[in-house]
Amino acid sequence: MKKILVVAPHPDDEVLGCGATMKKMAQSGAEVHVLVVTKGSPKMYTHEKVENVRAEARRAHAILGVSQTRFLDFHAPELDITSNSAISREVASVINELQIDTLFIPHRGDIHHDHSAVFKACLVAARPVGNYFVKTILSYETLSETEWAPPFADDAFIPTMFINVTETFVHKMEAMECFKSQLKAFPNPRSLHTIESLARFRGSTVGVELAESFMHIRSILT
């Protein structure tokens, strides 16, 4: 049985990036886990707001068949002043405890520095040294973060893997509807209309109705 960990800088990034894929893999018998790295800094977010969005995430994950949701308490949006080694140690601890073989992580070029920090920390946590578990690493795109990156090649999201989610996309939309605090009205990119439009565009590039796309970071075949 595959053991999958989706690492999200903030609640809802994981659903935006690969919610339908999570559902598809759970339906296929995989054990899907989510690790949310941050909570809102108390300088900017009340305890009530933090607990509300975490409750929204739990409801969304139940719809997607997530086995377990874990939350770390690093402050958002302050990962640029947080020890990256501390983040990587926490991620590595979860990977080792659960014996994760497939890792989904945010794109390194996203405009939000929390996303790039989590990307780097995850790569360190999943280094193929010693008795390592992670064999596959994929990077997902996050609407309102990935597409706003600066127009430089190093920051571009260039999908190299597409997953047909035509059958499970309805569950992603249902899960996103749980995030009342995060959803916006179109034309904001975090609108249901835009989320569906992206899936249709990604699907049309590979000849399916709806798809989620990823950058393939590494696979180790044994």
Image (spheres, rainbow, N blue to C red):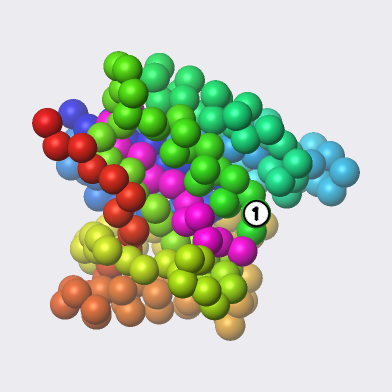
Picture residue at 25% right of the left edge, 35% below the top: 135
Please state the horizontal and vertical placement of residue 161, each as a whole percent of the image: 25, 61
Picture residue at 42% right of the left edge, 41% below the top: 6
Quadrant in which the C terminus is drawn: top left
Indicate the quadrant where residue 113 lies: bottom right
Q: Secondary structure at mark 1?
A: helix
Tell me which amino acid carries mark 1: His
Is 87 or 68 nearer to us in this picture?
A: 87
Hey, which residue is sitting farthest left in the picture? 222
Image position of 143 (left or right of 48): left
Is 138 or 55 nearer to us in this picture?
A: 138
Image position of 208 (left or right of 155): left
Indicate the quadrant where residue 171 lies: bottom left
Q: Is residue 61 above or below residue 19?
A: above
Please state the horizontal and vertical placement of residue 85, each as a whole percent of the image: 60, 29
Please state the horizontal and vertical placement of residue 8, each as a whole percent of the image: 52, 45
Hey, which residue is sitting farthest right in the picture? 43
Q: Does residue 108 belong to the magenta stretch?
A: yes
Q: Is residue 97 above or below residue 189?
A: above
Picture residue at 24% right of the left edge, 78% below the top: 205
Image position of 124 (left or right of 160): right
Q: Does residue 174 belong to the magenta stretch?
A: no
Image position of 156 (left or right of 160): right
**From this viewpoint, is residue 118 visible?**
yes
Q: Is residue 206 above or below residue 41?
A: below
The residue carrying pointer 1 sits among few (fewer than 14), some (14 to 19) or many (20 or more) residues within 10 Å by Cα, namely: some
Picture residue at 48% right of the left edge, 52% below the top: 106
Is 86 or 16 nearer to us in this picture?
A: 86
Is 217 or 209 nearer to us in this picture?
A: 217
**Region rendered in magenta:** 98-111
Reading the image, the residue beneath label 1 is 113
